[in-house]
Image (cartoon, coloured by chain):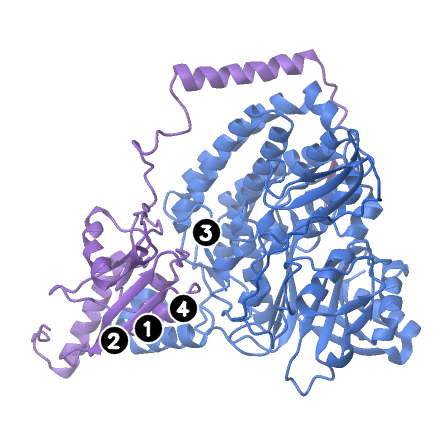
Chain colours: A blue, B purple
Amino acid sequence: MTAETGTHATTQVLRAALGSQLIDVAEFRGDLTLSVTRETWVQAATLLRDHPTCDFRLFLDLCAVDYLDQPERPARFEVVLHLYSVSRRHHIRLKTRLPESDAKLATLTNVFKGANWFEREAWDLYGIVFEGHPNLTRLLTHDDFVGHPMRKDYPTSERHVLQHPKERLLKVPEGSEKLVLNIGPSHPTMHGTFRVQALMDGETIVDAAAELGYMHRNFEKMAEVRTYWQIIPYTDRLNYCSSFMNGHGWALAVEKLLGIAAPPRAEAIRVILSELSRIMDHIICIGANVVDLGAITPFFVMFRAREDIYDVLEACCGARLTVSYVRIGGLAEDVPEDFEARCRRAMDSVREVLVQAERLLTRNIVFTKRFKDVGVMDRDNALSYGWVGPCLRGSGVAYDIRKDHPYSGYEQYDFDVPVGTVGDCYDRYLVRMEEMRQSLRIVEQALVKLPRGPVIVDDRRVALPPKADVYSNIEALMNHFKLVYEGILAPTGEVYGYTEAANGELGFYVVSNGAKCPWRVKVRPPCFNIYQAFPEMIKGHMLADAVATIGGLNVIAGELDR
Amino acid sequence: MATRVITVDRSLKPGIWPLVLGHWETLKNLVRTLILRQASTIEFPEKRRNVSGRYRGIHILTAREDGTPKCVACFMCATVCPAECIYIESGERPEKTIEKYPTRFEIDLLRCVYCGFCVDACPEEAILMSRENDLVGTTREELIIDRDRLMARAKLLDVGTGYHPSEHDVRRPVRIAAIEKLKQERGIGNSRPPRG
């Protein structure tokens, strides 16, 4: 089925079931948006999930948007849901409108397990009440925080005294002899600052709850007062283990909004650096995971290759971690002369450490005993929680955006998608190892056919003119001034740009009202959904298994808390 | 290209031999590091890495031949800065060809995210970045560096800059050719602008 007939069929199904309750059907840049009334919100979401012609089982994202002082809009708030159908291969956006005086909506937690934290986030940041939600408390901000910071009329200079730490995340029955154990927020097995509170019966975890937000800086609010260009450095701080890929995703989302495409050379370089970043991310994930189990050698061995990849990035853009190398419409500048040689050196060292890590781990009996059949996630739950990337593939769903919706020229490269069968830690480990080998294949092919040409679009509304022109002629100088002062003026509309980042689908939902800054940016962080499932996964298991599981989920606080 | 899905092989049997192989790898690394001295780490701070020629370190304000700042106080860098760390106040220069210069130019290095956008935005090549990455101060004020300190760093240019406009080397001929052409068209002689 082609995408067009697919979207058409979905609209038909919803129209047949809801009639006039389906308020609006819109399509912009290939994204289908269906708006329904708030009364039919749960019904529509359930229908999209269960109807055989829809089959939108993968929960992606739920967020709110505040349209303050926009008289042409019928209501102030909108709640936006993004879903994906693995079998039909398309995305859908479902929206509903809520007036300011009565910002209440029925909860979707019974339809998608992943909706839980997203609804808490929407309540926390926008003050939208989800009726029937099991635990509608603040998620990203502190409990003492006053107001809802993402609302457009929130005074940003406001300061609050936040002094009462949240001691208890769990309800412990009176007189219980069970032990409450805090893992984190500052603990070696929590890779970043986040906390899990477990109720222990001996060595077994009876109940668990997770807390996050320690590194929350409200990237999305900052993005609302930055131009599309200025947001690039902020994206580096999302998943800081593979920072280049965030910028890549952001650039593609904005390019989709603008309706432009980067030149082939820029796309090929982006692919090379993204794949190298993916290898880096997987190295950290596996390395840190086995350190939790007590094996430090693989960590040190694998980090040698990571160092060589950082050298490639530094040669290209002058920074190892905070790369800021992409620009809207291409790249900041061309790669250095010795780019290929550096890449090959990095690839050689990755090959070498993969062999070593394989010998150290894959058939090591201590390792397999700790990993096999631990932290099992079945396919349906993984989809309902909105798992993506290597974790979802470990559970047996072959969803890889590079294959299913190729971007940046991924369709030209020959590579395979590894999937697991059981969905345990061992499968996730094997999938990551195989993905690194596949990434090497992609880099190899991209290096061989790296096209020549410019690395940024020749469009003065998007890209700065070449410096030689700026220094020598007035037109270029004026273009330069205009672009710096006015920024990129995107058309009015909304897009959802998505890429396969190291952890899975990294989405940027961008709403533009034609100004130089986006009206709303929502990041769909892959590990947010993955971490959400963690407390459920460890219930009834040993504490040591929880430690083995968390590392393999690769939760990155910068991306989790935004 | 058609989707090719491969299922990972989890049937590999663990045993004693893999443990021996693993120890062999560990032993190899030990020999490599301790005996062959091929460690991946370096003895910082006695030894330092060579950073790339595009390294985004602490900024440099460049100077004209007469030692005055090349900056024309156009506020482009301050506008584009995502961290809002650049503060400029401008004054008038006596000569008509240049018009303005910064009386104050401060960069708050604690706010700066070293993204290099100021370098991209500068139309005069007045701001560059160095390869310097040692940043030590005992107070916050000390790390707000002003115009004169930014300019005194120009000696770093001799040891090589960090992030700078990519057409750095081809720029000058282009610009000189453009100016020569302009002069010819207007019949202007080689009179240099008066020094301020």
Indicate the amino acid at tag 1: Phe
Look at discs 2 and 4 and give the one toward the viewer.
Answer: 2
Q: Are marks 3 and 4 in contact (CB under 8 Å)?
A: no
Quadrant containing the N terminus of chain A is: bottom right
As helix, strand or loop, the secondary structure at mark 1 comes to loop
Label 3 sits on residue = A323
Indicate the amino acid at tag 3: Val
Label 4 sits on residue = B80
Classify A247 as above or below A72: above
Percent coordinates x, y for residue A160 in the rendering: 57, 65
Q: Quadrant of residue B62?
A: bottom left
Residue, x 34% and y 66% (percent of image)? B86
Is disc 4 on the same chain as disc 3? no
Indicate the amino acid at tag 2: Ser
In the rendered structure, the answer to whether residue A366 lies left or right of residue B85 reads right
As helix, strand or loop, the secondary structure at mark 2 comes to strand
Q: Are marks 2 and 1 in contact (CB under 8 Å)?
A: yes
Percent coordinates x, y for residue A117 in the rendering: 74, 56
Look at discs 2 and 1 and give the one toward the viewer.
Answer: 2
Residue B90's disc is 2
Label 1 sits on residue = B75
